Image (tube, grey):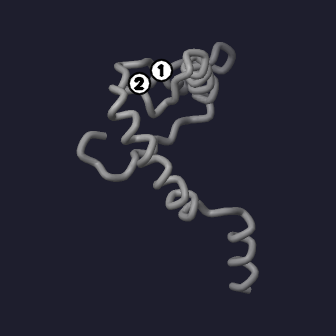
Amino acid sequence: MPGNILPVVISLPPTSIGPISKFNLQLANKALRYWHMIVELTLDRVVTKVSNIPYSVVNIKPAGRLDPEMIEQLSAYREQMIPILNATTPRADEYAAATESAD
C-alpha cells in the first residue's frame, strides 16, 4: 500500500489457493515475481452445485508492472524484511515448548 512501511498481509480462503498458484505460475513463466507487479484482488461469490452453499474465491489480475528502479528498491527491502517477518511467525515447536512450560 502506498505510504505504508510494512507489507500488507492479506488472508485468503483455502478456495483461493488454485487461483493464486495459477497467477504465480503465469508470472514465473514470464520471469516475473509477485513483488514486481501491482495487482488487483477481488472476491467472486460462488455457490456449490450440490449443497447450494456460497463461498468466495479470489480473482487476481495484474493492474500494472513496477518500473525497474522500484523493483530494485523493493527487492532490497524484501531481503531486509524476510528475517524480521520470519522471526515473528510462530512455529509449532515453539508453541509446544510454551504449552509444556505452562503446565
Quarter of the image where one finds residue 94: bottom right
- Residue 71 is marked as none
Residue depicted at x 37% and y 52%: 6
Mark 1, residue position:
59
Q: Is residue 33 above or below residue 23?
A: below
x and y, in percent, of residue 1 in the image: 31, 40
Q: Position of residue 29 (x, y in %)?
A: 60, 16
Where is residue 16, by image quadrant? Answer: top right
The reply to whether residue 5 is in sight is yes
Residue 1 sits above or below residue 59 on the image: below
Nearer the observer, 97 or 82? 82
Q: Residue at x 62, y 18 (%)?
A: 48
Q: Which residue does the image show at 55% across and 59% down from the upper left? A: 83
Number of numbered discs on residues: 2
Residue, far top: 49
Dot placed on the residue nearer the N-terminal end, 2 or 1: 2
Q: What percent of the width, then of the height, locates residue 47?
A: 56, 18
User: Where residue 37 sits: x, y (%)?
Assistant: 41, 26
SS for tag 2? strand
Secondary structure beneath dot 1 equals strand
Q: Amino acid at mark 2?
A: Thr
Question: What is the C-alpha distance between the residues marked 2 and 1?
Answer: 5 Å
Q: Amino acid at mark 1?
A: Asn
Q: Is label 2 in contact with label 1 (beta carbons under 8 Å)?
A: yes
Query: Image check: 61 left or right of 70?
Result: right
Residue 63 drawn above or below residue 77: above
Question: Residue tagged by mark 2?
Answer: 42
Placement of the C terminus among the 4 image quadrants: bottom right
* Residue 52 in sight: no
